Image (cartoon, helix red, strand yellow):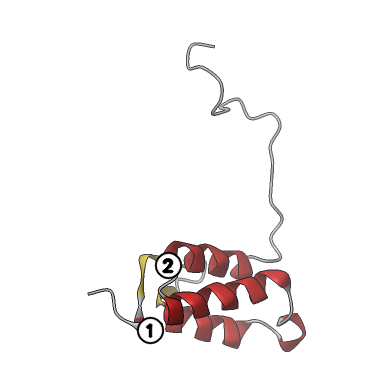
Amino acid sequence: MAGKGWSKRFDEPIVLDDGTTLTTLREAVEYLAKTVPKEEHNHPSVLNASDHLTRSAEQNYPMFFARAATLQAIHRHRDRVFNPDRNDHHWESANT
């Protein structure tokens, strides 16, 4: 059984760089509450994560979105890296 409310489990746990594992909605929201500084509580990714986590707990919203939003909030200060020299583009044929 996947649990109900805030005890619902992610299909795939969130494993953080420090080895912390978040398996439930409750663990995710508690982790964010503990680690996000007060001045960043209105950061768009943090607000988005809290919205998705709450919807998943209270309205049977898809857990996938809560997990993805939580990861975005946790990594809100990491730069996205795009490597234009990368040769394995998914739209290219394997024979190209």
Corner quadrant of residue 74: bottom right
Q: Secondary structure at mark 1?
A: helix
44 over 94 or under it: above or below: below
The quarter of the rendered structure image containing the C terminus is top right
Find disc 1 in the rendering and name its residue.
Answer: 5
Residue at 71%, 55% (x, y): give it.
79
Residue 55 located left or right of residue 38: left
Q: How far across and down, in percent of the image, does residue 37 sit?
A: 70, 85
Real-space Cα distance between discs 2 and 1? 11 Å
Find disc 2 in the rendering and name its residue.
Answer: 63
Q: Residue 46: in sight, yes or no?
A: yes
Task: Find the residue positioned furthest to the left.
Answer: 1
> What kind of residue is marked 1?
Gly
> What kind of residue is marked 2?
Met
Q: How far across and down, in percent of the image, does residue 21 sit?
A: 42, 73
Mark 1, Cα crowd under 10 Å, few <14 / some 14-19 / many 20+, is: some
User: Viewer-proximal residue, 90 or 54?
Assistant: 54
Residue at 58%, 73% (x, y): give it.
49
Mark 2, Cα crowd under 10 Å, few <14 / some 14-19 / many 20+, is: many
Residue at 58%, 87% (x, y): give it.
34
